[in-house]
Image (cartoon, helix red, strand yellow):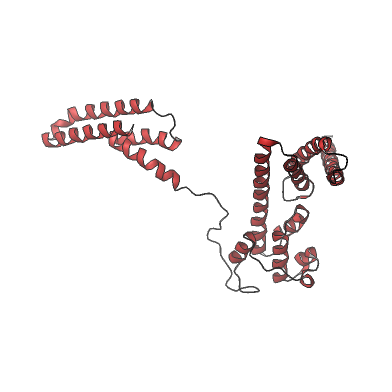
Amino acid sequence: MIALLALGSIIEFLLLVQALLAGAASIYWFAPMHLTLTIAALLLTMRKLRGMSALQCFALPIGAAMGPPGMLFCLLIAPLAASSRRKRQIVYNNVRIRRYRIGNSLSPVERLGRILDDRIRYPDCDEIGSLATMLRYGSLQARYRALETAVISFEPRLSPLIVMALSDEDQTIRALAAAAAAQVSYNLAQQSSELQARIAPSQNLDDRYALAMLFADHGCFNQLLPQSQRTRLCQEAGRKLDEIAEQLSAADIRRRALREVRAHVGRAMERDRDAQSRSLRNSRMELSP
C-alpha cells in the first residue's frame, strides 16, 4: 500500500510540475486527472484495509482531500498519533490551592499523591483514636490523618469513613475523598479482572475462592459503590460460594469462613429486598388517591 501511494504521489507531483509550467490554462486538464488519480488510489487502497487500525483506515479518506500525497502522509503519521495517546488518570485542572500549609507543610495535591502511592506516615496507635470521631469532630489536621489511615489500609468495612469525608466541610478533604473513592472502584475492577484472567485457563480453586470473597466483601460492605452494583456483587458472590462449597473437602479450614461470608451475603441481599419492598410500598401509597 505504501508503494502504491508513493507511486501515485510521484505521478501527482509530475503532473503538478507540468501544469505549473504550462500556465493557468492547464487547470482544465490537471483537475480531472488529479481527481481521477485520487479516486483510483483510494479505491485500490481500500481493498487492503485488513489488519490496519481504525485510525489508519480513516486517515486514507481524510488525506484523499490532498490526493495521493496527502493519503500517504496521513497513513504514515497515524501510528505516531496512536502511540502518543496516554492513559486516562485522575487529574486536577486549575485547582486553587490555599496559600497556607497544613500540618507538615504538604499541599493538598502533594497529600493526595502520598495517599494514592502509599507514601504516608502511619500514625501511632495513641494518635488514631476513633477514626469516625476524628472525621466528625477532629481538627483539620486530624481529619486529614484519619482519611489517610482509612485510605492506605482500606478494606470495604472502612468505606463509611470515606463516605463521611465526602461531606466534610473542607473542600480539600472532599476532593481527596472523591479521588480515593474513584481509586477504590478502579482497584476493585483491576483485582477482579486479574483474578478472572487467572481463573479462565485453569479454574484454580484458590483463585475462585479469592474472587468470591472479593465480591462478597465489596458487595456487603463497600458503601462507595451504587446499590445496584453491590446487589450484583452479592448475587455473583453467593453463586460462586455455593459452587466452591461443593468442591471443598470436609476438613478444609476455609469452610467456616465460607459459611460466615455466605451468611453476610444472605443478610445483605435480604436488606436489599426489604429496602426495595419498602420503596415499592411508598411509591404505591403516593400514587394511590
Quarter of the C terminus within the rendering: top right
Quadrant position of residue 198? top right
Residue 38, placed above or below residue 209: above
The reply, left or right, for residue 40 in relation to residue 173 is left
The reply, left or right, for residue 281 in relation to residue 95 is right
Residue 97, placed above or below residue 188: below
Residue 146, placed above or below residue 261: below
- Residue 149 in view, yes or no: yes
- Residue 286 in view, yes or no: no
The reply, left or right, for residue 246 in relation to residue 68 is right
Residue 216 drawn at (x, y percent): 78, 44
Q: What residue lies at 40% left-to-right and 45% top-to-bottom? A: 80
Residue 43 drawn at (x, y percent): 34, 25
In the image shown, does 125 or 95 lie closer to the viewer? 125
Query: Which residue ends up furthest to the left in the rendered image?
Result: 22
How many dots with numbers? 0
In the image shown, does 48 or 287 lie closer to the viewer? 48
Residue 66 drawn at (x, y percent): 29, 36
Residue 235 drawn at (x, y percent): 78, 38
Quadrant position of residue 231? top right
Quadrant position of residue 195? top right
Quarter of the N terminus within the rendering: top left
